[in-house]
Image: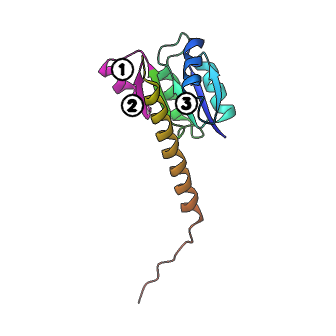
Amino acid sequence: MTTILIVDDKPENIELLMAVLNNIDYKFLTATTGKSAIEIVLSQKPDLILLDVVMPDMNGYEVCTILKANLTTKRIPIIFITAKDDDEDESKGFEVGAVDYITKPFRPTIIQARVKTHLKLKFAYEELERLWKKRPVSRLQSSD
């Protein structure tokens, strides 16, 4: 089952995102702090992370930077969902490694579409990697 980690310091935002994505067969993990999000990611390895930027202990940019620097978590797609809507904020989100940046208030259909898209891309990339590793190794032979 596909697992999504939702990280937001406001439980009502977590509940809203779960409700928006509930019609799709996802398992949800939740965190209300950056530190707990990192612990969950390291132990559970979710397929995708929905991450708020503004949190009390560690902001979303810091969480994303830490996860992208770790070899075991760097390929997990991170989508920022935040009220920070300046161009600079969005640019920073992409600079630290997010695959998408959605501002609040959001439209449920946009969340659903982008989550589906980034999960498809992740799973396609993993399948390509698997196939690449299984390919027969050919040897180049010289004609001398």
Callout 2 secondary element: helix
Q: Nearer the viewer, residue 48 or 12?
A: 12
Which numbered disc, 2 or 1, marks the residue that appears first in the sequence? 1
Query: Label 3 belongs to which residue?
Result: 49
Q: Give 71 or 116, whichever is nearer the viewer.
A: 116
For residue 57: magenta?
Answer: no
Could you tell me which secondary element the residue under label 1 belongs to?
Answer: helix
Identify the residue at horizontal 51%, vertical 77% (top origin): 139
Q: Nearer the viewer, mark 2 or mark 3?
A: 3
Q: Residues within 10 Å of mark 2 (few under 14, many from 20)?
A: some
Question: Which amino acid type corresponds to the residue marked 3 in the rendered image?
Answer: Ile
CB under 8 Å between callouts 2 and 3?
Answer: no
Q: Residue at x 39, y 31 (%)?
A: 94
Marks 1 and 3, how far apart at CA:
18 Å
Amino acid beneath label 1: Asp
Looking at marks 1 and 3 on the same chain, the residue that comes earlier in the sequence is marked by 3
Residue situated furthest left in the rendering = 87
In front: label 1 or label 3: 3
Image height of 67 relative to 88, above or below: below
Residue 32: give x, y in percent of width and height. 60, 15
- Residue 66: percent from left, percent from top: 53, 28
Residue 36, position in %: x, y? Answer: 64, 20
Q: Is residue 117 left or right of residue 35?
A: left
Of residues 23 and 85, which is closer to you in this image? 23
Badge 3: how crowded within 10 Å, few (<14), some, or many (20+)?
many
Q: Earlier in the sequence, mark 2 or mark 3?
A: 3
The magenta-colored residue range is 82-104
Quadrant placement of the N terminus: top right
Is label 3 in a helix, a strand or a loop? strand
Q: Is residue 100 magenta?
A: yes
Q: Which residue is mark 2?
A: 94
Q: Which residue is mark 1?
A: 89
